[in-house]
Image (cartoon, rainbow, N blue to C red):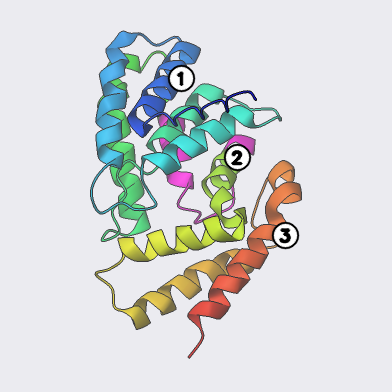
């Protein structure tokens, strides 16, 4: 009888992060001087109050972009925006303040060293778009926004873990206030004609996302 092959261990998050960051640098033609930027970025996403908006989320977004089969206007700017979009996230700040902090962190790292290589303003605009406060201006913006919301379409157990992680990020808010704010946030997406702007993600995930959101709202509104 053949011995069972041992399962390969999952690489630690910092290892996966470094591999993906270095792959992005290589794709963009950026040098080793930017390797420490990835290390500082990981530190931002590793702050103790983060439970969903952490390194796992940022990494998942970048990997989702890699797997996207459609046309991308400028992959470099979009990829950098996904890396940095939640770098400045803080649950005690407004979404506008959090994204502004992310933009500031990105500019601080890339403005001087890569201003001639990367469209800095476009990356900042894409970061800001993930506030989901207005309709996308172009296909890259739509893609950034959709990728940020892929968790809405996760299978039930994963979605429930996401909602639990979000609640943990807002422990400074009492239950009633959290429920009211969360329901209003979720309803903004149900009021739209579609949650996802791109045809690709709308076709794949719209139905699942709506079902998850409606189920969460029903749970939050229970007496």
- Can residue 124 be found in the magenta stretch? yes
Residue at image position (59%, 53%) is 154
Q: Answer left or right for 172 relative to 127.
A: left
- Mark closest to the chain's N terminus, 2 or 1: 1
In the image, 146 versus 219, the foreground residue is 219
On screen, 142 above or below 219? above
Read off the residue under disc 3: 207
Answer whether labels 3 and 1 touch (C-beta < 8 Å). Answer: no
If the image is split into quadrants, where does the N terminus sit? top right
Mark 3–mark 1 distance (CA, rounded to whole Å): 32 Å
In the image, 180 versus 121, the foreground residue is 180
| Mark 2 neighbour class, 10 Å CA radius: few under 14, some 14 to 19, many 20 or more | many
| Mark 1 neighbour class, 10 Å CA radius: few under 14, some 14 to 19, many 20 or more | some
Read off the residue under disc 1: 24
On screen, 183 above or below 121? below
* Residues in magenta, as a range: 121-140
Mark 2–mark 1 distance (CA, rounded to whole Å): 18 Å
On screen, 172 above or below 124? below
On screen, 12 above or below 129? above
**Which label number is shown at residue 143?**
2
Coordinates of residue 220 in the picture (x, y in percent): 49, 79
- Mark closest to the chain's N terminus, 2 or 3: 2
| Mark 3 neighbour class, 10 Å CA radius: few under 14, some 14 to 19, many 20 or more | few
């Amino acid at each position: 009888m053949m011995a069972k092959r041992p399962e390969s261990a999952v690489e630690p998050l910092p290892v996966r992060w470094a591999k993906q960051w270095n792959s992005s640098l290589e794709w963009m033609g950026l040098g080793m001087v930017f390797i420490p930027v990835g290390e500082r970025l990981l530190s931002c996403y590793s702050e103790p109050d983060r439970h969903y908006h952490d390194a796992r989320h940022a990494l998942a977004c970048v990997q989702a972009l890699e797997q996207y089969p459609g046309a991308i206007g400028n992959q470099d700017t979009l990829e950098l925006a996904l890396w940095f979009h939640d770098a400045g996230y803080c649950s005690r700040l407004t979404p506008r303040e959090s994204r502004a902090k992310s933009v500031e962190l990105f500019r601080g790292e890339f403005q001087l060293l890569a201003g001639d290589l990367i469209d800095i303003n476009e990356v900042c605009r894409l970061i800001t778009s993930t506030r989901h406060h207005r309709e996308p201006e172009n296909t890259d913006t739509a893609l950034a926004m959709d990728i940020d919301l892929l968790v809405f379409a996760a299978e039930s157990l994963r979605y429930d873990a996401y909602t639990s992680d979000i609640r943990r990020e807002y422990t400074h808010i009492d239950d009633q206030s959290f429920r009211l704010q969360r329901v209003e946030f979720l309803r903004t997406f149900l009021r739209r004609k579609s949650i996802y702007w791109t045809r690709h993600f709308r076709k794949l995930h719209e139905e699942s996302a709506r079902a998850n959101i409606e189920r969460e709202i029903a749970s939050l509104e229970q007496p």
